[in-house]
Image (spheres, coloured by chain):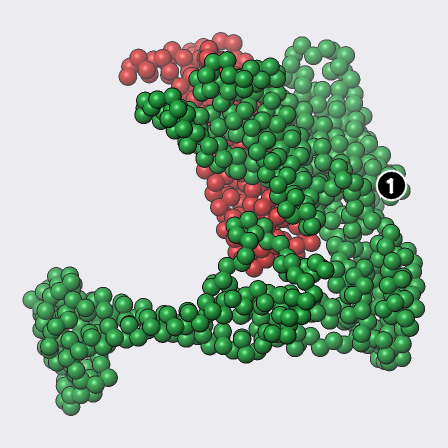
Amino acid sequence: MAIDPLKQVWLIGPASEAEGMPERLARVGLMHVADVVGGASAPQGAVAALSADTRALEAQIRRLSETLDVLAEYARAPGGLLSNLIPTPIETTRAELASALDALRVEALHAEVKDLAARRAAAQAARDDARRRFASLGPFRGLAIAFPAEQALRWTSSHLWLVAPKQARRIIERRLVPDGVTLEQVAVAGGMALVASVTLREDASEAFARLHELGLEPVPAPASSTTLDAYVAAIEAKGAEAEKELAAVEARLAELGKLRHQVELVLGHYEERLETARAASKMLTTGRAAVATGYVRERELDAFKAAVGRELPHVALVVEDPDPAAPVPVSLTNSRLFRPAQFLVEMFGLPNYRAFDPSAYLFVSFVVFYGFCFGDAIYGSVQLALSWALLRRYRAYPGLRNFFLLLAWGGVSSILMGALTGSWAANLWEGKYLGEGNPLGWLARKLMIGDPMEKPLVVLGLALVMGVLNQLWGVTMKFHGCWRQGDWKGALFDAGLWYLLLPGVIILVAAFFEPATPGWLVTLGKWLAIVGAVGLVLTQGRGEKSLAGKIVVGLVSLYGIVGSYGVLAFVGDTLSYSRLLALALTTTIVGMAVNIIGSIINQMLGAPFLVGVLVFALVAIPGHLLNLVLSGLGAFIHSARLIFVEFFGRFYEPGAERFAPLGASSGRIRVVD
Amino acid sequence: MEEFWKLYFTQTGIGWAMIGAMMAVMFGGVGSATGIRIAGAQAGGALSEKPELFGKLLILMALPGTQGFYSFIIAIYTASRTGLLAGKPEVTPLQGVGLLFVGICAGIVQWRSAVYQGEAAAAAISMTARRPDQSGRSILIPALVETYAVVALLASILFITWIMGIKAPVAVQ
């Protein structure tokens, strides 16, 4: 359980090797390539970054991504719902990839798909326009009135308008039309009135604006004079034409959608090549020599040396310990037991290379918190079974494997907690649901030690005790982290002194709520708190130069604004664990509600025994499944939050770069042979 | 109706206490839901660009949910100290009104702090979307807002304890 020890490697070879070096290192797949100049300054003079023109690759990736975006609408990703929820790389073979690269004409396909997408957009717009216009003018079909084109009349201008009949009447009766405009209602149909306006051509634009202001919607004039009936028929024909065009385009896109798999494979291949090409910009060349640097896991060093000897025979390899000031990437390897917790650490952010991996130290806390929140024996069993099945399916993917293993452990913890608190699909075991003397009821009563619904304050107290213990565990981690880095002052002053103050505060708070606390214990608490507080005031400002600064910082650190911790942070973080009670009760109460609803519906129907059982199952199973998903999600999020905020907040600083060997993973495809 | 009023609000104070407890739950619940909506909307935007950040953003989205739990704890503690939980409520009208004020005041702090925490979480989500390596630090920004929700929870627990510790009604001159 640790951060993998790494070695920094330098590869120095003749300039003739420079061009092929990134691709060969990608084939080796063991080295995390780092910047030779460390990103400090751009190389000058004869020394230059190994140039790699990535523009062609980027253009190809853009084409493939655009093509995939369109084709994805017509061809769903294989694998069904689960694969959509948990995306994993597409598994392929070298032969299949080579065949896809050979068969796919990327530029031609992109051009065709782009053209089809544009035609589809135009056809959709034309269809929608025709539908909209037909919806308003369709009811007037059959009217053989003249509908002149815009410029058809020499001295006058004529328009057709649509308006609500009431508004048309109001405008005409109250003579709201501007002078020089003749307005006449032609027909009323489909809840709209069709009105015609005539005005002198020179007044046309002003009259048009005024009529529009009055709420009249103009019917666009035809290109050549026609009748209204023919005009509506033309709209209908345009709509049908657009539909036909759309159907043809979509049929072709659906046909091209069959290429989705090939497109994804080729895209994954180009993304890998781009990554390799970008790695080249981290290497240097002097004209005579090429230099690359990076990191290799110590345990893989021999394999790396052998692979470099094979792939780059003219390149010299220098191995050294990583520079203490360099931002070294981090790779975690944990034992089988603690590996699931690695998922949480990777989710939050990796630790500094010189710090320590907290996976093992948070594993038990997380699993206990999860069980506390989710605590139900039947829900836990279902979760365990599901996690186990998914674990087997996604065994090849370390991230998913760790996640499902963590959920499986959460399931075990929930089973235990559910058994201890008598929660089996909430209170399903009670006689009113499964009948008196049912075996589940016998088991539940046998294993139960207490019901949180009956004694919530006891459970709240338990949750807070767990909070205190986890806080002190966090302080211990701080001590551990400082000590292993040789910072004994940090270990003793920033962590050790809290071990005096915090227990003192806990005793005093307990004495406040429980007056029967023995006097000697209160005195002990008082002295622990005083010694711890004075020690912190005297030491937390040790970085300040002036005496006043030291004292002020020391005092403020007690509160928790500066320094590693604070009394308020301790109280707040401890109270935050009260969510464990709330979540535990929520799971049980929702489950009880599901059972009650099932029972009520059953009673209402008054069905015979077997039908009744079926009805109850039909209501209860979906209800409990919903509760299982929602409560499981809540339990995961809030258990993780207690780790990330309340526990990690004491000692942990994430932010290290992930150790990512060049060529080892692409994210989109995975070559399995 | 008169009997109801007498039973819950003048002869005993259990009605006031129950309203106070539920006010705390109501304010806290509304605040948490609003805060999560604010953070969730921001996360939705970030995830449409970078779906791989789902794991990191999930916790940030859930942070404003805490106030709902704190309010729940206030309600449970009120129910417990008044004897409601055991089915034997013992609370004077004066104590009941005191608990009502505690519930309302604590609820308002939970409500507003959840909304502010949602806004801070949205800022932290933006930061994480731009600098995923800083997700650990960004989580501390909204967590700081929660301090005052904790203070309100703590004050509520203390005041409920003190109010229920009053042995006899204060004499009115």
**Chain letter of disc 1 in the image:** A
**Up-down relation of residue A578 to residue A397 (above or below):** above
* Residue A251 image position (x, y, % from top left): 42, 69
Q: Nearer the viewer, residue A269 or A152?
A: A269
Q: Nearer the viewer, residue A120 or A516?
A: A120
Residue A264 located left or right of residue B5: right
Q: Which chain shows up in green?
A: A
* Residue designated by label 1: A484
* Residue A399 image position (x, y, % from top left): 68, 48
**View extreme (left): residue:** A173
* Residue A112 image position (x, y, % from top left): 49, 77
Question: As shown in the figure, which amino acid type bears the numbered disc 1?
Answer: Arg
* Secondary element type, mark 1: helix
Q: Quadrant of the C terminus of chain A?
A: bottom right
**Up-down relation of residue A81 to residue B74 (above or below):** below
Residue drawn 77% across the image and 70% down it:
A23
Residue drawn 12% across the image and 80% down it:
A146
Q: Residues within 10 Å of mark 1 (few under 14, many from 20)?
A: few
Image hue for chain B = red
Q: Quadrant of the N terminus of chain A?
A: top right
Q: Nearer the viewer, residue A458 or A182?
A: A458
Residue drawn 69% across the image and 61% down it:
A671
Residue A424 located left or right of residue A549: left
Name which quarter of the figure residue A576 lies in: top right
* Residue A616 image position (x, y, % from top left): 41, 27
Can the viewer see residue B126 in this picture? no
